[in-house]
Amino acid sequence: MLTRCAVLGSPIAHSLSPVIHRAAYRQLGLDWEYTAHEVDEAGLAGFVASLGAGWRGLSLTMPLKRVALDLATSASDVAATVGAANTLVRRDHGGWDADNTDVPGIVATLREAGAAVAAPVCLWGGGATAASVLAALAFLESGPVHVHVRSAARAEAALAVAAALGHPAEPAPWAVLPACADAGVTVTTAPSGALDELATAVAAAGATDRVLFDVVYDPWPTPVAAAWQAAGGVVASGLDLLAHQAVGQVRLMTGADVPVDVLRSAALAAIGARA
């Protein structure tokens, strides 16, 4: 029986997950199939219910990460705390385990970049990805976090994650503050284009030996990433996160580990081919 996995989301045509997971299967010598499917929140339950016995795992992107928890038989502590799952793995009896590999992927990305997380952290954006970043920063025992949002209400769910983990975090206005200059790492989870008007000021606030982690990877570089690099700073991208979180997904679905550079190289090649 063919073993099948897939990525679900809406929109999904841009997803690099098929490229990454197929590269993992080649590395592991697995004759598995990995596909992409356009599925929205209303259609997720029906799609999952329709899957045959050969299905092993699902990667979930927006807008499915929260609603996926409702379908799961069980959830990891990380997924339950963050309130979002990016992975569903089928159990032997047919139920689904929910997990969140975004959080360990963020931890790995920040460590790889050499981010000075013991210092204060500037975080831009307060959505679901910001909640995962706050969970990762709690795990890393970072300094206090300033969460820059256009309205404090938009950050309530993310800040609740930090509070649940006992990690210091507070909302901040959508503006570069003096405190930004003290940040050991700056993280932006804002959608593409949202931080463009502040790109130069954000980069100017960061020292040349500090790290920017921008979760966007296409189009790349973003204005803030370009400005940060021009100033001599270190930049980690959403592509790094994509590869690191996929290492965790592959492990959950196959039980095996794949070097992150195998997955990152496959993604970079695919982006180059698109260009």
Image (spheres, rainbow, N blue to C red):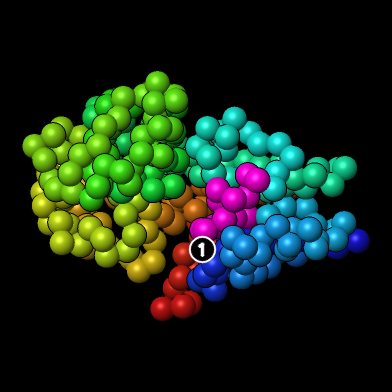
Q: Is residue 3 above or below residue 234?
A: below
Q: Is residue 185 above or below residue 174?
A: above
Quarter residue 222 falls in: bottom left
At horizontal 32% and vertical 54% (from top left) the residue drawn is: 190
Expressed as whole percent of the image width and height from the top left, the position of residue 87 reads: 63, 48
Q: Is residue 114 visible?
A: no
Expressed as whole percent of the image width and height from the top left, the position of residue 215 reads: 38, 53
Quarter residue 141 falls in: top left
Expressed as whole percent of the image width and height from the top left, the position of residue 225 reads: 25, 57
Expressed as whole percent of the image width and height from the top left, the position of residue 142 reads: 33, 27
Q: Which residues are magenta?
A: 59-70
Quarter residue 123 falls in: top left
**Callout 1 amino acid:** Ala
Q: In the image, is residue 68 part of the stretch drawn in magenta?
A: yes
At horizontal 50% and vertical 37% (from top left) the residue drawn is: 82
Q: Which residue is mark 1?
A: 267
Of the pair 145 and 185, the residue shown nearer to us: 145
Q: Quadrant of the N terminus?
A: bottom right
Q: Is residue 174 visible?
A: yes
SS at circle 1: helix
Q: Quadrant of the C terminus?
A: bottom left
- In the drawing, does residue 126 fall left or right of residue 5? left
- In the drawing, does residue 209 fall left or right of residue 115? left
At horizontal 15% and vertical 61% (from top left) the residue drawn is: 197
How dense is the environment of label 1, judged by Cα within 10 Å: few (below 14), some, or many (20 and up)?
A: many
Q: In the image, is residue 7 part of the stretch drawn in magenta?
A: no
Task: Tally the marks.
Answer: 1
List the single residue furthest toward the right: 1
At horizontal 70% and vertical 57% (from top left) the residue drawn is: 45
